[in-house]
Amino acid sequence: MCGALPKQPVFVEEIAPGSNAEKCGEVQVGDVLDQCSAIVLKAGKEGQYEKEGYGQRPYDNWETVMIDCNGREFKTVMNALKSNNERWGINHVTLVFRKPTAEEAALCVKAQA
């Protein structure tokens, strides 16, 4: 994915051979990452986890949320993607792509040059 400039859309830069994106056939180079899943810590249930240390929290203390990737820094989007981790009992990532606007497509061409 490319999108190195601050708040530039995150574009699909390449599709890895054999990847889910290639198998599905709907994601194309130049598409924009519109939303992605991220894992966030939920508040404890009535103080139930208040005195327990790290590693003592059950998997139900995490929840998956969808974040809007538009206008976010590349680093923020990558951190959201990395939060989808088997460590939290999560073994999948949800990505929502869209076709770029003409202006965004021009940015992607510049970034790849």
Image: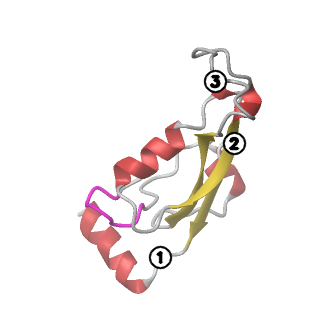
Tell whether 102 sits left or right of 107: right
Residue at the spot of label 1: 100
What amino acid is labelled 1 in the image? Answer: Pro
- Of tags 3 and 1, the one toward the viewer is 3
Q: Is 68 covered by the magenta stretch?
A: no
In the image, is 79 to the left or to the right of 113? Answer: right
Q: In this view, does 26 lie above or below 93?
A: below
Contact check, label 2 and label 1, Cβ < 8 Å: no
Q: Can residue 92 be seen in this view?
A: no
Badge 2 local density, few (<14 within 10 Å), some, or many (20+)? some
Tell me which secondary structure the magenta stretch mostly adopts.
Answer: loop
Secondary structure at numbered mark 3: loop
Looking at the picture, which amino acid does disc 2 mark?
Answer: Glu
Q: Which of marks 3 and 2 is nearer the N terminus?
A: 3
Can you say whether 45 is above or below 29 in the image?
A: above
Label 2 sits on residue:
63
Identify the image quadrant of the C terminus. bottom left
* Residue with the mark numbered 3: 50
Tell me the CA gap for discs 3 and 1: 45 Å
Which residues fall within the magenta stretch?
A: 3-10
**Real-space CA distance between mark 2 and mark 1, rounded to the nearest whole angstrom:** 30 Å
Check the image and report above or below for 108 versus 22.
below
